[in-house]
Image (tube, helix red, strand yellow):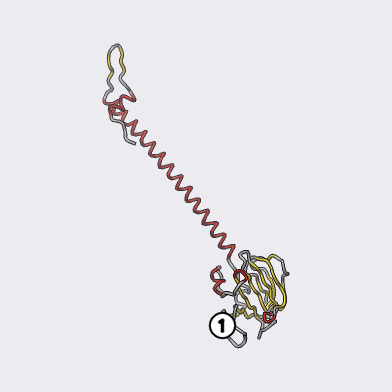
Amino acid sequence: MPLPTRTRRTAMLLGSVVVAGLALVPTAAQAESADDAFAAMAGQDDVQSRSGQAREENAALAELAASAEKAAAKIALNAWQLPIASGVYELTATFGQCSGLWSHCHTGLDFAAPEGTPIKALANGVVSETGWAGAYGNRTVITLDDGTDLWYCHQSQFGVKEGQPVVGGQTIGYVGSTGNSTGPHLHLEVRPGGGDAVDPARALAVRGTAP
């Protein structure tokens, strides 16, 4: 803020005092002291203003950090897991691959593993179907919160029941060779909204897991 002129400052702090008809005029030292007092007042205002700005900036940074933590937690919550432990399986057929083994191009991702190997849920969801599914053999379908259906096929036996909630990493069945199969493996399909199949490898990668 602009400072008052020297004369106004002097008048404001000391004034002209009249005693016995004599006007007492402030000395140069008193005027100098008045200048120092006003400078100090202005400095205090500046310090208070900077302090207020610092508090606002700190509050904004704290809010940003909290938002980042929430976003990281959400990403971690939505991350998928591999259906079979690393080092146990071999990918033997990929999405879109065509072969005389199938009536159409391959709609999933095949994880070859020893029969009886535990199959894990990719993510949290609810078992919407278990049972025989023709060429898919013993199939478990798990529906995620966003409506995505995950198909786990050719199982030797089931580990969950229809209507049961599951969490990512939970054993939901065991590798087998039921249905149209030439050897024990898990055929995994990903169907957003319960519709057409999409590439499981890409779906896993997008959600933080690469097979």
151 left or right, relative to 72: right
Amino acid type, label 1: Gln
The residue singled out by tag 1 in the image is 97
* Front residue of this view, candidates 84 and 204: 204
Kindly indicate the quadrant of the structure image that contains residue 122. bottom right
At 68% from the left and 66% from the top, the residue drawn is 126
- Give how far across and how far down residue 208 sits, in percent: 55, 68
* Front residue of this view, candidates 104 and 16: 104
Kindly indicate the quadrant of the structure image that contains residue 182. bottom right
19 left or right, relative to 175: left
At 59% from the left and 78% from the top, the residue drawn is 107
140 left or right, relative to 18: right
- Give how far across and how far down residue 121 sits, in percent: 65, 70
- Give how far across and how far down residue 104 sits, in percent: 60, 83
73 left or right, relative to 25: right
Neighbor class of circle 1 (other Cα within 10 Å; few <14, some 14-19, many 20+) is: few
* Relative height, residue 181 to residue 2 (above, below): below
Q: Secondary structure at mark 1?
A: loop
* Front residue of this view, candidates 139 and 166: 139
